[in-house]
Amino acid sequence: MEHSTDALFGGYITVLVAIVMGAILPVTALLATRLLAPFSRERNKGATYECGMLPIRRASTSIGMRFYLYAILFIIFDVEALFVFPWVLTFADSPSAYWTMFAFISILGAGLAYAWKKGALQWR
């Protein structure tokens, strides 16, 4: 009976060690940084840039809509590449794989059409 208990909890010991080390290492790094790093209480320390030219405007500016359109395009093509390769391997084994990928590509095509409509594919 003892042997089966060791086999059952043997994998959990590794997970427990990983959790403990995952908690100890960041705390140790933060404490070491606080104790060893130089610290300054100057007025300009909180400025956007500590050296060089003074900032002209606030650092918190709004991000334009084009950034989100580029993100959508990246996700469309990146996710498509991620799922097409395993699909090719299972295409011959499963007859429903064709229709599943057809639905997936249709959703991606709708996202591409939206980005195209918003002008994300035009070079400016």
Image (tube, rainbow, N blue to C red):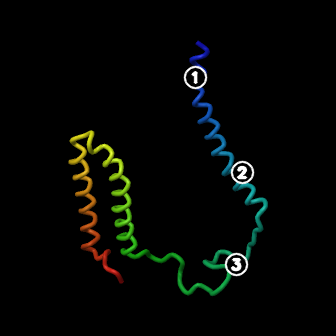
- Observer-side mark, 1 or 3, equals 1
Q: Position of residue 25 (x, y in %)?
A: 68, 49
**1 relative position to 51: left or right:** left
Mark sitting on residue 43:
3
Question: Which mark sits nearer the N-terminus, 2 or 3?
Answer: 2
Q: Quadrant of residue 64?
A: bottom left
Q: Position of residue 99 (x, y in %)?
A: 20, 48
Amino acid tagged 3: Arg
**104 relative position to 4: left or right:** left
**10 relative position to 43: left or right:** left
Q: In this view of the protein, which residue sits in the foreground, 63 or 8?
A: 8
The residue labelled by disc 2 is: 28
Question: Which mark sits nearer the N-terminus, 2 or 1?
Answer: 1
Say few, some or many: other residues with alpha carbon within 10 Å of mark 3 (under 14 / 14 to 19 / 20 or more): few
Q: Residue at x 48, y 77 (%)?
A: 61
Question: Which mark sits nearer the N-terminus, 1 or 3?
Answer: 1
Q: In this view of the protein, which residue sits in the foreground, 13 or 101?
A: 101
Q: Residue at x 63, y 45 (%)?
A: 22
Q: Is residue 49 above or below residue 33?
A: below
The residue labelled by disc 1 is: 7
Q: Residue at x 57, y 17 (%)?
A: 4
